[in-house]
Amino acid sequence: MYLSPMLGVLASAAAVLAHNHDDPEHKQGHNDNDSVNVDDNRASYLVKRGVHAGGGCGTQNSNAVCAAGLCCSDAGVCGTGGAFCTAPACQISACDGNQTPAGADTSSLPRPLFGGIPYGIDIRHCTVHGNVALTFDDGPYLYAAALLDILQHNNVTATCFVVGNDGAKGMINNAATGYPATLRRMVAEGHQVGSHTWSHQDLSLFTAAQRRDQIVKNEIALSDVLGVVPTYLRPPYTRWTQDGLDDLRALGYHVLNYDIDTCDWQGDYSAAKTTYSTALSQHSPSSSSWISLEHDIYNTTVYMFAQYLIDTARRLNYQLPVDMGVLQAHVASGGSSSSGGGGSIITSVLDDQDVHNIYTDAHCIRSCGHTAISSSTKSGGSHSVPAASTAVAAVALAFAAFL
C-alpha cells in the first residue's frame, strides 16, 4: 500500500471521479463583464474576461474567461472547487486537465501499425471463445495496489486503461502519489496498460488538436514512468466520431471497448453481479467470449467485486487470461527523439500467427442505456519512446493473447 498526498481531499475527489458515465448538463450563465478583442488565428471575435462566480464562461458563452482564482465548469459556469476546477468536471482550458506532465515530448514519435489487430475501428468483442477479459478504467487510484494483489493471488491478468490527471488524484508520473510504482508493477506482473486519455474528456466534442493533446499528454506521463507508450485506447464515456477513430489510427492506437458494462460506478453491486453473471450464462463458453468493463477507482469494485468477477467466470468454465502472448522482435528504420536525435526503433510485437482475429460487433446492446453503435459511424502493443538526445529504443507491450 502506498500513501497518497491527496488524502485530505478524498471526499471531493471521489465525488468528481463518480462522473465517469454521466452526461454533463449544459447550463447558461450570465455575461456581465467587459469584453476584449482576441485572435485565435482563425477569426477575431469578442471574448469576455474576468467573469465573476456564477457567471457564464467557456464554449457555451462565446469562450468567456473566468476571473483569476475561478475555473469554468463543464456546464459553462465560473466557480471554485471540484465541480469547476477538477477534470473532467471542468472545461479543459481552465482547470487541472490543462496541466502538462514532466517528461520527453512524444508528439513526433513514429507511429507504426503493429501486427494483425485492426486499427480505425471500434473493437468491442473477442472471437476466441471461452475467455473473459477483465478491464478496469480510470485508475490508478488509491485501491490500485489492492487490485493487483487480488489479481496476482488468483493468477489473473487484466487490462488497465489509465487516466493521467483527473479527479484531483494528481499526475500519474508524480512519484509522490505512488502511481509510478503501481504502473511499473502492472507491467511487471503481466497486465496490459492502455490509455483512457489525459483527463477523461469527451473526445467526441473535441477538435483534432484537442484530441491529440489528450493522447500525447498521457503518453508523456506513461513514457516518463514506463519508457513506452500504449497503443490501445478506450475513449471516455465510450464516445467518439469517425474522425476521432481516423485520428487515433494515425496516432497508432487501437480502440478497445467492451460488450459487458457492469455499471459498477452506480454503486448497485447486486445489479452489477446480475449483469455480469447473466451475460456469461446466456451462452456456452464454447461459443462465446466477453470483454467486461469495471472501474478500479471504487473500493467495493476492488475489495469485493473483482473476486466475484473471477470466481463467476471460473464457475461457468470461462478462462481468464494469464499470459501476455509470445513476443517477437522486429526492427523498424527511422525515428527521432524530441531533441532531434534519430536512429532505429527496436520494438516487440506479436507475430501475426499469434494474433487472434478481432472484429467489431455492430449489434452489441449493452446495459445502462447504452445503444448499439456501428463501428463505421460512431461512437495495445506500445511504441518505444525517445530518450533525450539519444536514439529511440524500447520494448513494446504486446496485447493480451486472449483477444
Image: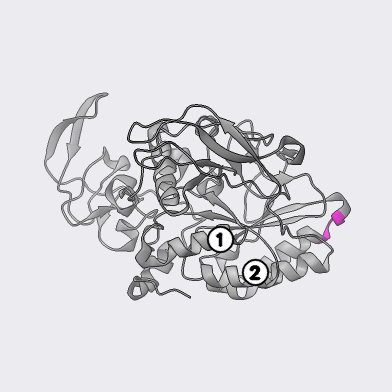
**Residue 290 shown left or right of residue 398 in the figure:** right
Report the magenta residues as a range: 281-285
Q: CA distance from mark 2 to mark 1?
A: 10 Å
Q: Position of residue 371 (x, y in %)?
A: 64, 45
**Residue 56 shown left or right of residue 315 in the figure:** left
> Can the viewer see residue 253 in this picture?
no
Residue at 63% x, 72% y is 150
Residue type at mark 1: give it.
Met
Q: Residues within 10 Å of mark 1 (few under 14, many from 20)?
A: many
Residue type at mark 2: give it.
Gln
Whether residues under marks 2 and 1 lie with C-beta atoms below 8 angstroms apart, the answer is: no
- Camera-side residue of 351 and 134: 351
Q: Residues within 10 Å of mark 2 (few under 14, many from 20)?
A: some
Q: SS at mark 2? A: helix
Q: Looking at the magenta stretch, what is its main secondary structure?
A: loop
Residue behind mark 2: 152
Name the image quarter holding residue 40: top left
| Mark number displayed over residue 75 | none
| Mark number displayed over residue 186 | 1
Q: Position of residue 160 (x, y in %)?
A: 57, 56
